């Protein structure tokens, strides 16, 4: 499994943890410790994922419009996994 795919999975997990576990505990339960822990981890993984999208585009393995879609896919929870399955997992036909 490539670093790009692993970073997308980790970024998705951090987004889901932040949005659906840490933030409800902060705003409903009044406990913000998980936001303080998961928030910076999520921020690092988000930047890493976007940097790897840029790197793939820079190396010519992804065109500019696909790279923009990849960076936008990092915003919603599950976006990087969806992006990988929709745009990157398509195998060319065997010759």
Image (cartoon, rainbow, N blue to C red):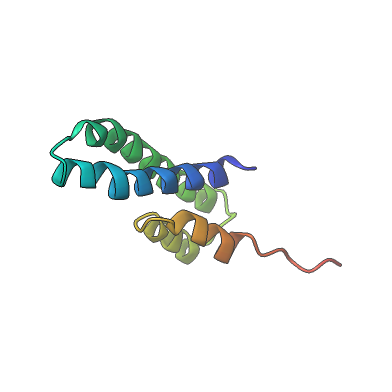
Image location of residue 21, percent across then percent down: 30, 44
Nearer to me, 33 or 15? 33
The relative height of residue 43 versus residue 54 in the rendered view (above or below) is: above
The relative height of residue 63 versus residue 42 in the rendered view (above or below) is: below
Q: Report whether 23 appears left or right of 2.
A: left
Image location of residue 75, percent across then percent down: 34, 56
Q: Report whether 21 appears left or right of 24.
A: right
Q: Report whether 91 appears left or right of 72.
A: right
- For the C terminus, the image quarter is bottom right
The relative height of residue 73 versus residue 33 in the rendered view (above or below) is: below
Residue 61 quadrant: bottom right
Q: Residue at x 51, y 49 (%)?
A: 58
Image location of residue 37, percent across then percent down: 28, 30
Q: Residue at x 50, y 46 (%)?
A: 9
Image location of residue 71, percent across then percent down: 40, 56
Q: Residue at x 40, y 39 (%)?
A: 45
- Looking at this rendering, what residue extends furthest in the right direction? 95
Q: Residue at x 49, y 42 (%)?
A: 7
Say how many tags the image has. Answer: 0
- For the N terminus, the image quarter is top right
């Amino acid at each position: 499994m490539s670093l790009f795919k692993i970073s997308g999975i980790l970024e998705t997990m951090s987004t889901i943890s932040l949005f659906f576990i840490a933030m409800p505990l902060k705003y409903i339960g009044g406990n913000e410790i998980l936001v303080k822990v998961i928030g910076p981890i999520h921020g690092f993984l988000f930047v890493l994922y976007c940097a790897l999208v840029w790197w793939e585009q820079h190396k010519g393995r992804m065109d500019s419009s696909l790279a923009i879609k990849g960076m936008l896919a990092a915003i919603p929870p599950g976006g990087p996994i969806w992006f990988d399955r929709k745009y990157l997992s398509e195998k060319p036909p065997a010759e």
